[in-house]
Image: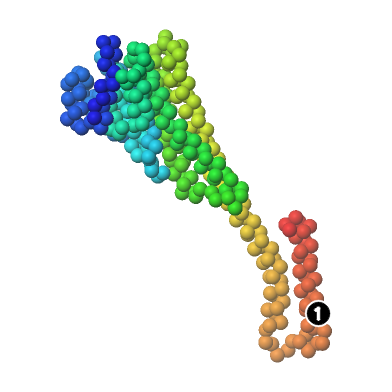
């Protein structure tokens, strides 16, 4: 579907959604696009890039897909590609899915837009919209981390499973990689002489903020997973400690019972009237002695 959003003497923006190969080639002929641009538009897994071709700028960004599955592990599964071709008098955007972020920008610069839109203004709005697509997923990731952290320290609190945390780690690592690439190419997009302009400052600050955010979550995920492993090891050690204490109590008692349970013909203690009380007393003394020794060592 093609949207001729802005069409003035000074500015033209054409937004194309889900074009076929034939439609892309028609666009290439209409707007005199280089063949490499068409090939990059056809590749759904293309990572963010910046290319300058014969006075034009070709930019590929990746917006976060809010409907991506939890086990998404590739750029195509987690994000949606947005291709932007910019030259004097023309701004062309191509994307396979009708992204809500791009739709809002189209509505903003639609017929009811006040003032004369510029290519720079539209481009900045598109870039900010792509970056803002990571906002809700990152907030959801933080809530998942909080739930996992509570579950680590409180067994009564239902926590995400390790499988969910593994999927979160993959999504965050992939988002971090994509945001880092976009931040890098956006710094190259703006000429040094124009970086002080407010619009470009907004783009740079937004890219840096989202990159810092995703790196912070990435570090927290790794720390919580390490904490979970440490807590699991600690709980295992506590269980082994209890089992060891029980073994230490019952091992000597079992030995004594085993000795007197043997059916030898000559066991003088069996005929003694004080044999049974003496053995019970010995077992009690040994148990008390083991308990006192454990308490002195701080094991109980």
Residue 289's x, y, as percent? 79, 66
Q: Is residue 297 above or below residue 266?
A: above
Q: Is residue 4 above or below residue 287?
A: above
Based on the displayed image, in which of its 4 quarters is residue 199 positioned?
A: top left
Q: Is residue 28 above or below residue 167?
A: above
Q: Name the residue under label 1.
A: 278
Tag count: 1
Q: In this view, does 177 lie above or below 186?
A: below
Residue 58: in sight, yes or no?
Answer: no
Q: Quick one: 59 or 82, which is closer to the camera?
A: 82
Residue 259's x, y, as percent? 70, 80
Identify the image's colour scheme: rainbow, by chain, secondary structure or one colour: rainbow
Q: Quick one: 153 or 18, which is closer to the camera?
A: 18
Q: Is residue 111 left or right of residue 134?
A: left
Query: Residue at the spot x=63%, y=59% of the render?
Result: 240
Residue 119: in sight, yes or no?
Answer: yes
Query: Residue at the spot x=60%, y=56% of the render?
Result: 236
Q: Quick one: 193 or 134, which is closer to the camera?
A: 134
Indicate the quadrant containing the N terminus: top left, top right, bottom left or bottom right: top left
Check disc 1: other Cα within 10 Å, few if <14, some if 14-19, many if 20+. few
The single residue placed furthest to the right in the displayed view is 274
Q: In this view, does 91 lie to the left or right of 256?
A: left
Q: In this view, does 131 lie to the left or right of 30?
A: right
Label 1 residue SS: helix
Query: Residue at the spot x=34%, y=12% of the render?
Result: 116
Based on the displayed image, in which of its 4 quarters is residue 188 positioned?
A: top left
Residue 275's x, y, as percent? 79, 83
Indicate the quadrant containing the C terminus: top left, top right, bottom left or bottom right: bottom right
Query: Residue at the spot x=58%, y=50% of the render?
Result: 157
């Amino acid at each position: 579907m093609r949207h001729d959003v802005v069409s003035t003497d000074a500015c033209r923006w054409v937004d194309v959604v889900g074009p076929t190969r034939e439609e892309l080639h028609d666009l290439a002929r209409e707007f005199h696009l280089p063949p490499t641009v068409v090939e990059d538009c056809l590749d759904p897994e293309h990572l963010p890039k910046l290319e300058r071709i014969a006075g034009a700028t070709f930019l590929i960004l990746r917006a976060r897909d809010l409907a991506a599955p939890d086990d998404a592990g590739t750029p195509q599964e987690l994000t949606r590609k947005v291709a932007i071709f910019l030259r004097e008098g023309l701004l062309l955007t191509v994307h396979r899915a009708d992204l809500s972020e791009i739709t809002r920008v189209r509505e903003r610069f639609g017929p009811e837009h006040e003032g004369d839109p510029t290519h720079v203004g539209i481009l900045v709005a598109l870039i900010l919209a792509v970056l803002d697509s990571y906002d809700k997923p990152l907030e959801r990731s933080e809530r998942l981390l909080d739930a996992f952290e509570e579950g680590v320290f409180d067994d009564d609190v239902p926590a995400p499973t390790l499988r969910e945390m593994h999927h979160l780690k993959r999504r965050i690592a992939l988002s971090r990689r994509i945001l880092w690439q976009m931040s890098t190419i956006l710094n190259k997009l703006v000429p040094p002489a124009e970086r002080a302009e407010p619009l470009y400052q907004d783009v740079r600050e937004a890219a840096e903020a989202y990159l810092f955010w995703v790196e912070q979550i990435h570090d927290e995920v790794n720390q919580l997973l390490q904490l979970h492993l440490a807590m699991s090891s600690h709980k295992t050690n506590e269980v082994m400690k209890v089992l060891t204490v029980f073994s230490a109590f019952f091992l000597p008692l079992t030995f004594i019972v085993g000795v007197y349970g043997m059916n030898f013909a000559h066991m003088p203690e069996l005929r003694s009237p004080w044999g049974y009380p003496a053995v019970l007393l010995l077992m009690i003394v040994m148990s008390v002695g083991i308990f006192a020794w454990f308490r002195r060592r701080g094991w109980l």
